[in-house]
Amino acid sequence: MRTGSIVLLASAAVAACASSVVREPPAPLAEFPPAYDVKQAWSTDIGASSSKGHLRLTPRVSDGVVYAADPQGRVSALAVDSGKQIWDVDLHVAVGGAIGIGENLVLIGTRRGQVFALARDTGKQLWTATVSSEVLAPPAAGGGVVAVQSVDGRIAGLAVADGKR
């Protein structure tokens, strides 16, 4: 009985200590002058948003043009200084990864393992190729080759001119 009383008393003491948590208040924030005066230059709607999955559809900027895609295959080119639309194309496909740019191409990878190559200046579809599985990473182009990584861990090298391996 004495051992039970000691255990009970020790448990009560531990519980009492745990219930009175001492928290230090946060330190006040330091005041500082802003280093830059940031203002939004423009904003525009580029299409549908994604409520499924964790897509990272990152726009690309090159030579004064912003290239962006929505998850349903709408691809747009916008003037970086004004947001004015240069061209807009609807591929009607489920885009899986971000836009790639290189070799005067805008490259789009899809969830069905397709790669679309569009002309940078007009958005005209130049070719389509199929790779081994879903494309989540942005395709890259250089040296006459379009490199595409798919989710199965494979990388395909496609010819810039026609998308053939």
Image: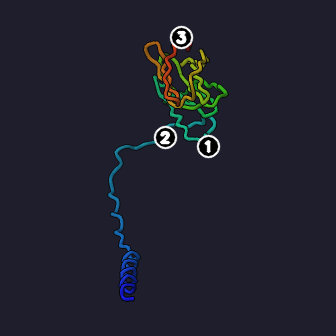
Q: Tell me the tag on residue 51.
A: 1
The residue under the point 38% across, 73% down is 21
Across the whole image, how many numbered discs are drawn on residues? 3
The residue under the point 34% across, 45% down is 35
Residue 125, image x, y percentages: 61, 18
Whether residue 38 is situated above or below residue 2 in the rendered picture: above
Residue 5, image x, y percentages: 38, 87
Q: The residue under label 1 is which amino acid type?
A: Ser
Q: Residue furthest right?
A: 92
The residue under the point 39% across, 84% down is 4
Asked whether residue 65 is in view, the answer is no
Left or right: residue 101 versus residue 20 is right
Between 12 and 94, the residue placed more toward the observer is: 12
Residue that carries the numbered disc 3 in the rendered image: 161
Quadrant assignment for the N terminus: bottom left
Q: The residue under label 3 is which amino acid type?
A: Ala
Residue that carries the numbered disc 2 in the rendered image: 40
Looking at the rendered image, the disc whose residue lies closer to the viewer, 2 or 3, is 3
State the separation of the CA atoms marked 2 and 3. Answer: 38 Å
